[in-house]
Image (tube, rainbow, N blue to C red):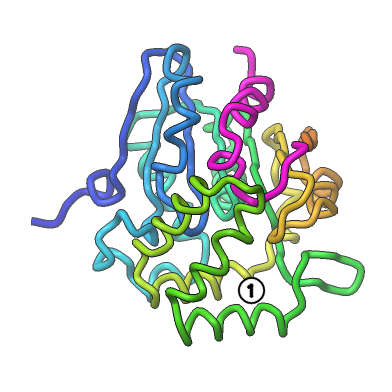
Amino acid sequence: MVPSLLEALNVQVVGSGEKILVLAHGFGTDQSAWQRILPFFLPNYRVILYDLVCAGSVNPDYFDFRRYTTLDAYVDDLLHILDALRVDRCAYVGHSVSAMIGILASIRRPELFSKLILIGASPRFLNDNDYHGGFELGEIEKLFSAMEANYEAWVNGFAPLAVGADVPAAVREFSRTLFNMRPDITLFVSRQVFNSDLRGVLGFVKVPCSIIQTAKDCSVPTSVATYLKNHLGGRSTVHMLNLEGHLPHLSAPALLAQELLRALPRC
């Protein structure tokens, strides 16, 4: 028997509040990345959690290499989940690639989203003329080559770089979820994400956005947060965290939770 999408992507709804909050994880993690954030929201929100189809917590047989060639397929999954749960309005928190998935979903269905909160978001990772995305093409290709040559060694090197801060527990947690992913899926998704360019759609976003960026992120320079603010079509604000790393929900969950609570709509 083929499971429903909600079963396949391990959808959970927790919390006792009336307002609906979606927490969408980024590349290399799964919904467990939010476990230290959740307690701050359970009393006042109904929180929807799910796993991206590429996550190691999802049966890899569900990952269709022909379907998931662009982020549009991930947007389809998100909107299917919200429709299946009969959600007509929600606040959305997306980390990394899920920030961009949320942006695309809000363009398609703006009425669904009261607010987008974008953590470590980037519309393009590659540098391009006067745009500083953080990476040259050669650097990206070296990353892919390292992943292909020795996945275990790549994870052991990449996880502490991505976490940035000296938080060994966060490095262990990120390493665990990276190791849970099937290496060929990790490489496929990495190529897709690092080579994507969504700068051209930012102006179509009309939903209010809060951009949360750490002071030092090996994947996303602070200039990208400014670029997003200047090019998103709706009202947007930038919130800088005096932290290092791409995964503040793992390295400094209490600090991030307070920032999220401030950024969320009051009603």
* Quadrant position of residue 181: bottom left
The magenta segment: 241-267
Instruction: Please name whichever residue, 162 or 124, is drawn nearer the observer in this view of the structure.
Output: 162
Residue 18, relative to residue 260: is it above or below?
above
Instruction: Please name whichever residue, 15 or 235, is drawn nearer the observer in this view of the structure.
Output: 15
Give residue 202's position: percent from left, percent from top. 73, 51
Residue at 66% over, 78% down: 140
- Magenta span has 252? yes
Give residue 113's position: percent from left, percent from top. 56, 32
Is residue 170 found left or right of 132 in the rendered image? left
Give residue 261's position: percent from left, percent from top. 62, 21
* Quadrant position of residue 64: bottom left
**Residue under numbered circle 1:** 195
Give residue 118's position: percent from left, percent from top. 65, 41
- Magenta span has 182? no
- Residue lying farthest right? 130
Q: Quadrant of the C terminus?
A: top right
Q: Quadrant of the N terminus?
A: bottom left
Residue at 51% over, 58% down: 27
